[in-house]
Image (cartoon, rainbow, N blue to C red):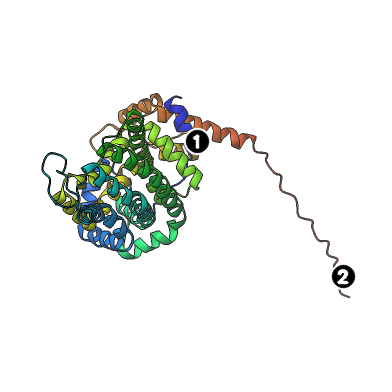
Amino acid sequence: MSRVDLLLKLSIDRDRRTNKGEVEQHSVKHAFKVYSENLGKMLLMNLVYAFIFALPFMFCVFIWPMLLKSDVFARGNYNFIGQIGIGYPGVVNTMAEGYKVLFKEYFHLYIPLLSASIVPMVFGLSGVFHCMRGYMWGENVRPVKSFFRGIKRLWKPFLIVAVAFGAIMCGVLYGAFWHISLLKTGADFAGSWILFIFLIIFVWVMVAILYFLLPIFACYRFSLKDSLKNSSLLFLILWPGALFASAFSIGLFMLSLAGTVFNFLIAILFLGLGFTFLAALWTSCAQKAFGNYILPQFESRESGGKVKMESRRGVNPYKEAKAKKKAQEQSAIGQASRARAKDADNTKEEAPVEKKKKKPTKHVSYKRKK
């Protein structure tokens, strides 16, 4: 399927912006600029979100694994050097048996609660992304009031995605921890490695689709079906950038596995600014994609294929408009825009013109006065 066919499958509509300003095309640069200018508001919003919605998830990711591991090994009195010729008194077990008990705790309690903590974390992002779309568009945003207003407006699609994402991640975590348990006990095989690699790629792609899906909920009034379709199509069109952004986001959480120091540093980062920072990057980059692929098709359909060419000071407007028009006609988005405009014109021509019915006139009789 060509790029033009993918663009024509996109659902297009007017976005939710209230001002007429344009989004800056340098998305990452724009995100850092807006974030640094509103650092205090970002800190306040991140603290409100983290303490209300993300605290259980942060506890399950950054604190509970260390406590569980130390508790299981201390409670079992495992002597990991019992089989190398040193016979210390007490219970003598191998390291493999210690990890069997540890992963049994993971399977029975840790994974279900970690999956459940994902639901409020994703649900609370409705307020964060509602605020971020306003910041990136240059609108007036009050961090606390707009945060709860976003939850009120966007709670339904975010709740559906949160429950579905939590359920999917529960299955993914069971499969991944099963392979890791086999790896720790030396019982891993080719099938477990294939499953583990497949789960990594699956989560990578799923987060890359969420990279477009969550900002679409905040920026447009699409249905859930159209939003999911648009995010999947944008991923197919812009997959290198989406995969890089999702890998960067997942990598920040994975840094906690590097050691206790990194674990606490990453936890403090997300407690203070981490969630709003990632939301700012996702929103700015997604808005750039919306401005490049959805907005031109919508404007072209509304204006019958005519696109306004803005001139800059010190540049010949005729030559600039001619060059832009030529580049646009040769690009995939230009072909898709012309197809949208042609379909809109055909729809208008095929629509039957209804004749206005004449209203019946009332006959009034006048009597001449004598």
Mark sitting on residue 304? 1
Query: Which of the two residues, 245 or 361, is positioned nearer the viewer here?
Result: 245
Q: Please, what secondary structure does the residue beneath circle 1 have?
A: loop
Binning the other alpha carbons within 10 Å of mark 2 as few (below 14), some (14 to 19) or many (20 upward) gives few
Residue 303 as seen in the image, left or right of residue 128: right
Residue beneath the point at 48% across and 32% down: 8
Kind of residue at badge 2: Lys
Mark in front: 1 vs 2: 1
Q: 349 left or right of 265?
A: right
Disc 1 marks a residue whose amino acid type is: Gly
Q: Position of residue 291 (x, y in %)?
A: 37, 40
* Mark 1 surroundings within 10 Å by alpha-carbon count, few (fewer than 14), some (14 through 19), many (20 or more): some
Q: Which residue is mark 2?
A: 367
Within the image, what quadrant is residue 271 found in? bottom left
From what the image shows, is residue 52 above or below residue 225? below
Q: Residue at x 31, y 30 (%)?
A: 320
Q: Earlier in the sequence, mark 1 or mark 2?
A: 1
Q: State which quarter of the image contains the C terminus.
A: bottom right
